[in-house]
Image (cartoon, helix red, strand yellow):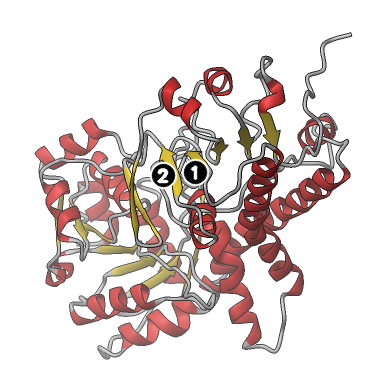
Amino acid sequence: MTLEKKIADKTLTVGIIGLGYVGLPLAVEYAKRGFPVIGFDVDQERVDKINKGKNYILDVDDKELRKVVKEKLLRATADFSELKKTDAIFICVPTPFSSTKDPDISYIVAASESIRDHLQKGQIIILKSTTFPETTSKVVRPILEETGMKVGEDFYLSFSPERIDPGRKDFTTHNTPVVLGGVTRECTRRSKLVIEQVTPQVHVVSSPEAAEMTKLLENIFRSVNIALVNELATLCDRMGNIDIWEVIDAAATKPFGFMPFYPGPGIGGHCILVDPYYLSWKAREYDFHTNFIELAAETNENMPYYVYGLIVRALSEHGVPLTTAKVLFLGAAFKKNVDDIRNSPAIKIMEIMLRKGSTNLIYNDPFVPELEVNGTHFRSQELTPELLRLVDCVVIATDHSCYDYDYIVEHARLVIDTRNATKNVRNHREKIVRLGSGNVIDNIVDPI
């Protein structure tokens, strides 16, 4: 049966390797459209939850997951031999970096080896994991061709980067345009047919390398611009009489030539923090040093240390030494309204403070019930007036929408705001120290 016939008859079986923030939403989208989906993961707990219709990803609708599982359109397994039952396979595994900022593509290699061991003629393999250019052609392809089969003839290989923004509701898996680059023209054609069943807007590029570089450019663009405003925020703090948030809002009134980016306590998540190092590592292979990109990454990684200094300074001005201060962190996730703590700047600041001798750290995050920092286990504490009055300092590290910032400022002794979350708070503003605002206490400008 041809690929087109399988798609038309909804008999195309889709395999998804890696059932995390990228893989599970993709699996549900295909299943919703009537395609049988097999999800693969080494985490047996995830597999069991999916097969019971239990969701663990905020971007996936609980009812939709239960429905496709009940209708037997989606099932999960840790048995990778079932890959032989699939027609198209998406690789959606993590790509972290090491402690020395070297890329770790071991998950991609492991997934590729699993496919190799069960590769069937005619299968379509699409790598979605963010990685450095040439991974698809020089890492994945050789592993698959160890079978004796040839790409573009016996199997079809492409790269189509994920574009997931956790917590986002307006652009999701089904309506965010995707980029696609196949190893051969036939690889691209077949992969495009498969992808279009979920995401109709597919932008084709000439090669996997171009698609891989596209993903890195998208995120390095954000990294560089965030670094710029982070550096300006630290300058405004030192100057003492300029508020960076006011400056950005003013610049954003220009209808052309400017796009607002905002400072913060650091960059978290996976892509924006990791991608610059993936590219700089690969560039060195060509005797090329991405100095500009690496400087931006360094600036962003310094922000948790800057916030630590801000906390120490503010506590000192209130006569409280860091070692005895009771500090409450609001938010542990890397961004608002999600439960994702990967590379969270809030956790990084807590790590720094623990290393410097802090012994009274507390946190609250309605999305993150518990976490571990430097080997210490923490549980989210209930946000009560008593707790707010008890602590010496409240650090707004993640600006979740559910927080009542008027309530927080009213009951707290001191608030360090790293996200400009208190911008609309009008009372007790003398308690607030905001990142990038120096000594500017009240920046509210009433209409003239």
- The picture places residue 164, in percent across and down from the top left corner, at 46, 49
Nearer to us in this view, 251 or 434: 434
Check the image and report above or below for 108 versus 407: below
Q: Residue at x 36, y 41 (%)?
A: 368
Q: Amino acid at mark 2?
A: Thr
- The picture places residue 410, in percent across and down from the top left corner, at 57, 18
Nearer to us in this view, 340 or 315: 315
Quadrant assignment for the N terminus = bottom left
Quadrant of the rendered image containing residue 425: top right
Find disc 1 in the rendering and name its residue: 176
SS at mark 1 in the image: loop
Q: Which mark is residue 135?
A: none
- Residue 242 in the figure: left or right of residue 11: right
Q: Residue at x 29, y 77 (%)?
A: 110
Check the image and report above or below for 277 versus 218: below
Q: Is residue 217 visible?
A: yes
Find disc 2 in the rendering and name its residue: 173
- The picture places residue 423, in percent across and down from the top left corner, at 68, 25
Local packing at callout 2 (Cα closer than 10 Å; few below 14, some 14-19, many 20+) is some
- Residue 271 in the figure: left or right of residue 365: right
Nearer to us in this view, 288 or 211: 288
The residue most toward the top is 448
Q: Residue at x 59, y 80 (%)?
A: 282
Quadrant of the rendered image containing residue 224: bottom right
Quadrant of the rendered image containing residue 445: top right
- The picture places residue 60, in percent across and down from the top left corner, at 31, 39
Dots 1, 2 in contact, CB < 8 A: yes
How far apart marks 1 and 2 lie (CA) works out to 6 Å
Quadrant assignment for the C terminus = top right
